[in-house]
Image: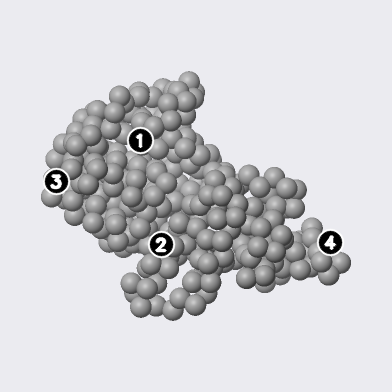
Amino acid sequence: MTKRGSPIGFIGIGAMGTPMAGNLAKAGFDLVVFDTDAARVAALASQHKVEVAKDLADLGRRCSTVITMLPDGKIVRRVLCGENDSFRNCVAEGLQKDATVIDMSSSSPVGTREVGALLKARGIRLIDAPVSGGVKRAVTGELAIMVGGDDATLEACRPILEKLGTQIFHAGPLGAGHAIKALNNYVSAAGLVAACEAVIIGRRFGLDPEKVTDILNASTGMNNTTKVKVKQFMLNGAFNAGFSVGLMAKDLRTALEIARAAHGPEGMAAHTVEMWNAAEQALGPAADHTAMFKFIDGGGAVDK
């Protein structure tokens, strides 16, 4: 469990990790941070009182609770367990028995359960706690957090999570948080495509796209994209909401993996994955996910 007075380790000082780590520092938690991008770590350290680990094992030795906020589950596994699960040059090499890891990345739930078993054999607890709300809500500390794991570990970690989000859901056992996060992003991504197509069709029919958006937002067609993305990041050509096409496509592939493992329906999911894979290839994985609008507008997904 978490130990009073022991620093929290935070690995992954990226677009989401930077404000999340900052909120923990502002809340009075002692932090030890690590990222392969030294410039990001230096920028965080210039704004908040944090210590910087010299390597992953050093961070593990100094902390009883470690948060990972990384691009995918494969990276999380390598960071926690080392190359080929060697437990060398990794966080677990330094962690003591009864330490806790909170994986807040968007990872595959199947892989999460495998990592959980590896860590459990060393006496280390793991919960998955991915988030929703994007950079804006990471900054304000108003993320939705969906947790997979046992009750006792969640309750021990709750004081930390409450500084990062305002809605904390216990989704179920280990891996459940990552499962619902992938399914949430599937619903979000499918809705984004539908909204883009509707606005583009309306414009080509001679309608004002801003009015189309306003009417959708006052009607049953309203969704997250029409509310907070179309005008803010698409129609103005900004395309900088802070979440990449590559990460969205990765989460959708995870959702499809879950659907197939559960022998569930996958017709729309499979089509949505195909569209986002095509966008990732055409736009590049680093492009913002709101750039799906210009991909569709250019015929990339419409004609498929």
Residue drawn 50% across the image and 39% down it: 15
Residue drawn 25% across the image and 49% down it: 126
- Residue 253 placement (x, y as % from top left): 44, 62
Q: Which amino acid does label 2 sit on?
A: Thr
Q: Would residue 4 be found to the left or right of residue 197 on screen?
A: left
Contact? badges 1 and 4 (CB < 8 Å): no
- Residue 233 placement (x, y as % from top left): 68, 49
Q: Nearer the viewer, mark 2 or mark 3?
A: 2
Q: Earlier in the sequence, mark 3 or mark 4?
A: 3
Q: Does dot 2 land on a helix, a strand or a loop?
A: helix
Q: Would residue 24 be found to the left or right of residue 302 on screen?
A: left
Between 1 and 60, the one lying in front of the other is: 60
Q: Nearer the viewer, mark 4 or mark 2?
A: 2
Q: Would residue 97 be found to the left or right of residue 49 on screen?
A: left
Tag 3 residue: 123
Residue drawn 69% across the image and 45% down it: 238
Residue drawn 75% across the image and 64% down it: 200
Q: Distance between the residues labelled 2 and 3?
A: 28 Å
Rendering quarter of residue 35: top left
Tag 4 residue: 208
Q: What residue type is labelled 1?
A: Phe
Q: Which of marks 3 and 1 is nearer the N terminus?
A: 1
Q: Can residue 232 be seen in this view?
A: no
Tag 2 residue: 254
- Give me the disc on residue 10: 1
Rendering quarter of residue 101: top left
